Image (cartoon, rainbow, N blue to C red):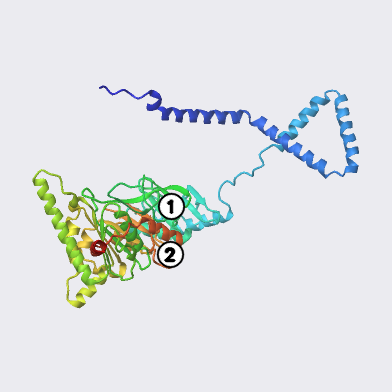
Amino acid sequence: MARRPLPRILSNGSAQIARSRELARTAADSATDVLHPLITITRGLRRLASAGRRRWADTPKDKRGPLLFLVASVVLVVALVPYGPLLAVIVLMAAAAWHGRDRTPPAPEGPDESQTKRLQSLYEALVPYFSIAEDPAPLFAHGGDWEKAFPAHEFDGAGRITHLAVRYPAYFTDGEADSRARIEQLLTAKSGRGREYRFEWDEEGNQLTVGVLAPLPTDIAAQRFVTAPGETVLGFTDPTHVHRTLPLTHGTEQRDVPPVVWRTGIRSTEPNLLVMGQPGSGTSTLLRSIALQALQYGDVLIVEGGGTGEYACLTGRDGVLAVECGLTGTLASLEWASQETERRLIAANHARQSGHPAPDDTRRPLWIILDRPSAFAHLAAADGRQDPQSLLQVPLRHGRAAHVTVVVADQFDSADALSDAVRQHTRARVVLGPATAAQLEAVLGAPPPTTPIAQVPPGRGYARLGSGPVHRLQVPATPDPYDDATSDADRQAVLALLPPRTTPADAVETVATEAVVEAAVAETS
């Protein structure tokens, strides 16, 4: 059967609606321009009438009679004078036009005195970097004009720079990282510390654009995100390099926020994740958020090296294979995970050779989440046992084909204890908490697009997926629900995402045995 085309109103209805809205907006603007004198006179008449009513209300009652007599006399004189009514109407319209004018003070053109001083100070500070003695017409010179160097600038209510465009000479070495770093450090110090700046270098046009970024929202609680299987929300970022938004619920409000989505699976180019941060930076919060999202479609194995009970809420839940806090249990669980990865690879290979799809048990995602595995490395070395990280080589190298994902989180002071396999096969990277530019570049493989600040909220950092751009990141609030410091709203949000608890096999057998015994006793009696 031939496919019937859609009606024209359905195929290009959106374009017609947009064109109609544009025509209506243009007509409204044209009508406003044409009727502007009439609108001004009407506004003035309304103001004159209001002033007359206020004057009448303020006049004492014993003087209202003479006032009425005076007004009537003026009206009579105007009516008797030749061309009096016409002149009265002209005077009234002129007074209405005068009182109906727009009294909004015009916006000041250009910066004020304090802003001019700040721009001049910034210009003088850049002179040693953007000028040389051989330049016959320097753009930057002591006592020079800053207006040519700063073609665009904006200030906030406190008088600090929020946007600045800087023109620099063509001989400036903008292709060298050290030269850029010096300029960025100077602009950060002179424009106001404690804020995040984004620097965009236009090497072709010899122009630098400085912008102040708004803080990322920290009030996003844990919830079910609208994602597909194989997608994990690491956090939320700016809409600069992300062309996707997720609908979020915050109390009774709903809003769309751009996320940082990490894709896993057999077609993922960065199937494993490494998270680094300082103590209290929110690495455990991120791992807890990832675990809650992974439990929707797969199984989770958690290894906690800190021994603080951050994942006690997941113990015994459906899909949680184990939550290990000791060295012996960690070695046993990771050894099983390595063997399970090999089993899945062999089963999938046999199925492909036989021309059959892979078995279902090999396609269910398996997540191995390790929080501070370096702590076990010291314990294993002290006891002369195997380092648990050595058991991650097979899942890290071949886990993608077996639907096995590894997530590792550790602290900067223990970065040297991470194994080479963890460093080489975790192409998705996240850094949380305060960190220097050198630390960020060492972990992410690229410098951050903004200036790092010293004081950041928990869960705030940067993320980079593979060779992609570096994103600012704010992890959704996913605290430990068993912690007394957790607020009731966040505790209920996390508890609502937890799967139900699994009934142990021995408990099921005990219940069945008790039921058989009770039935036998009932028959005997």
Give the residue at x 24% y 66%: 418
Image x and y of residue 56, in percent = 82, 40
Left or right: where 329 falls relative to 239: left
The amino acid on which the numbered mark 2 sits, given as a three-letter code, is Thr
Residue 354 image-quadrant placement: top left
Query: In the visual, does 492 lie left or right of 346?
Result: right
- Can you say whether 210 is above or below 5 in the image? below
Nearer the observer, 215 or 120: 215
- Foreground mark, 2 or 1? 2
Tag 1 secondary structure: strand
Residue identified by numbered label 1: 210
Image vertical order of residue 102 relative to residue 373, above or below: above
Q: Residues within 10 Å of mark 1 (few under 14, many from 20)?
A: many
> Which residue lies under the disc numbered 2?
486
Rendered image quadrant of residue 501 = bottom left
Q: CA distance from mark 2 to mark 1?
A: 38 Å
In the rendered image, which quarter contains the N terminus?
top left
Residue found farthest to the front: 525
The quadrant the C terminus occupies is bottom left
Residue 133 in percent (x, y) is at 40, 56
Question: Where, by quadrant of the figure, is residue 447 drawn?
Answer: bottom left
Left or right, 252 with reference to 479: right
Q: Residue at x 41, y 28 (%)?
A: 13
Q: State the SS at label 2.
A: loop
Crowd rating for badge 2 (residues with CA inside 10 Å; few <14, some 14–19, many 20+)? some
Tell me where residue 477 appears, x and y as whole percent. 40, 59
- The answer to whether residue 218 is above or below residue 388 is above
Camera-side residue: 78 or 251? 251
Residues marked 2 and 1 touching at CB (< 8 Å): no
